[in-house]
Amino acid sequence: MAHPKPYLVETDAAISLHFTDGETQSRMWKREPDALVFDYTRLMMGFALFAPAVRDIAMIGLGGGSLAKFCHRYLPRARIDVVEINPHVIALRDTFRVPPDDRRFAIHADDGVRFVRAAQRRYDALLVDGYDANGMPAKLRAPSFVADCRAALRPDGLFVVNLNSDDANAMRLIATVRAAFGDRVLVVDDAVGGNRIVFAGAPLARRIGVIERPESLDREAWAQLVLPFARIRAVQHQWLVAGS
């Protein structure tokens, strides 16, 4: 199978990964290679709001490794499996300063659908951010894949999906997630409205009081996450009130 080859755009401050001129897949600040540049990536870290003692994380889609690097650095007790089907993307891991594989971090050159279906491990968080030049592949939107993702989670695990707000299939995928997870689904828009983050799983039913820094996150990481976490909390509060 032929995979599209991404290209890089570099400035004095940053390196960006692209498949097309109109979309930026990932960006890294050279002076802060582990920082989360885009608001939607900070929102995706919302699983840590509901599962502060996360042990096992799976990610479908590597891109420039923003989420993988952040979790590797700031969640040192977690084991992280990252699945990427495109070898050209994996080949850029050193450019984006993605850490080498070790006992708690691994990049798998595999198809995300196959990896999830065959998963031997159960995860506390399963994040899907898989895009190519044509958007999110249809197989990552299929009901069978979403069902397999739910089966790969622990009972208190959280499923997280990044959607492009302009994707004509976004609402259909949200409906698919609701069919798999019932009413335990939150949809939160990022700050600029370009992405929608879908959270699904049992922990969403837990009431969260004052937003406080989880013990697993240091102050540097928390400074990047506190405002997105507050937005998630506000959406969750509205959802809980509507359901009571």
Image (spheres, rainbow, N blue to C red):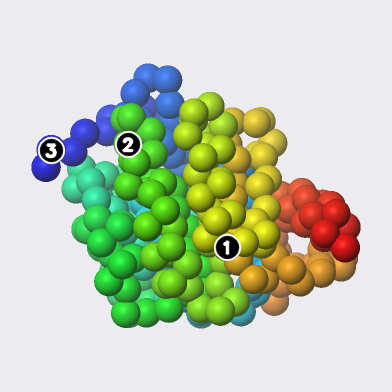
Q: Residue furthest top?
A: 21
* Mark 2 and mark 1: Cα distance apart in space: 26 Å
- Would you say 20 lies left or right of 53 here? left
The answer to which of 31 and 100 lies nearer the viewer is: 100
Across and down, in percent, residue 208 comes to 81, 68
Q: Which mark is residue 132?
A: 2
Q: Label 2 sits on what residue type? A: Asp
- Is tag 1's residue or tag 3's residue first in the polypeptide sequence? 3
Quadrant the C terminus occupies: bottom right
179 and 156: which one is in front? 179
Q: Choose between 241 and 6: the one closer to the eye.
A: 241
Q: Is residue 98 above or below residue 131?
A: below
Q: CA distance from mark 3 to mark 2?
A: 12 Å
Specify which label sits upstream in the sequence, 2 or 1: 2
| Label 1 element class | helix
Dot 3 corresponds to which residue? 2
Q: Quadrant of the N terminus?
A: top left
Q: Residue at x 83, y 59 (%)?
A: 243
